[in-house]
Image: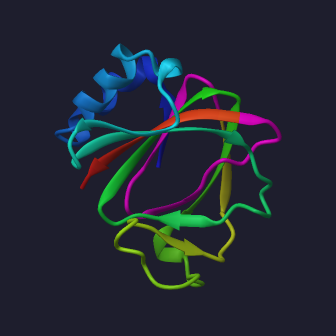
Amino acid sequence: MILDTLDQAERYKSLHPLFARAFDFLRSTDLLALAPGKHAVEGEDLFAIVEHCAGRTRAQARLESHRRYIDIQLVLEGVDEMGWRPLAQCTQPLGEFDGARDIRFYEDAPSSWVATPAGSFCIFFPDDAHAPLVSDGMVRKVVMKIAV
């Protein structure tokens, strides 16, 4: 897991061939004008999901993991307090992996919480279980999905 601000994104472009394109999209697009939902960038290899919703409590949040995609979750408005736990330490899955949605949920509790304010992002790799959208207010964010 990585936490940083968008103005420091250059540091991470070398981690994956599509990170440069993902960060370019985040910097060159009027993100606040995008409607909630999925937005294609590079087909199914790189796309954006815009969310604008009320936050949930820590108790309501469930850890999730992905196998096919890396997430870059950029908060645009509000504060998203994201939970995190190494996937290797998750021992209580809530059902099977959903391949169509590329997601599996867990009953395990996050081992840490990261308050992510507007202008900051978290990168979650397939070995990072995460519990996003924890807030006492509204959160607007963009999740870049990058094919592993």
Q: In the picture shown, does residue 85 fall above or below 106?
A: above
Q: In the picture shown, does residue 36 fall above or below 31?
A: below
Residue lying farthest to the left in this orientation: 17
The span picked out in magenta is 117-138
Give the percent coordinates (x, y) of residue 138.
74, 35
Nearer the observer, 44 or 21: 44
Nearer the observer, 19 or 144: 144
Give the percent coordinates (x, y) of residue 49.
44, 41
Give the percent coordinates (x, y) of residue 12.
31, 33
Q: In the picture shown, does residue 27 fall above or below 16?
A: above
* Residue in the image at 50% along x and 18% along y: 33
Give the percent coordinates (x, y) of residue 10.
31, 23
Residue 136 lies left or right of residue 87; in this view the side is right
Residue 116 in the magenta stretch? The answer is no
The quarter holding residue 59 reads: bottom right
* Residue in the image at 74% along x and 45% along y: 55
Give the mark count.
Answer: 0
Residue 145 lies left or right of residue 118; in this view the side is left
The quarter holding residue 16 reads: top left
Residue 29 lies left or right of residue 54; in this view the side is left
* Residue in the image at 59% along x and 82% along y: 94
* Residue in the image at 47% along x and 21% along y: 31
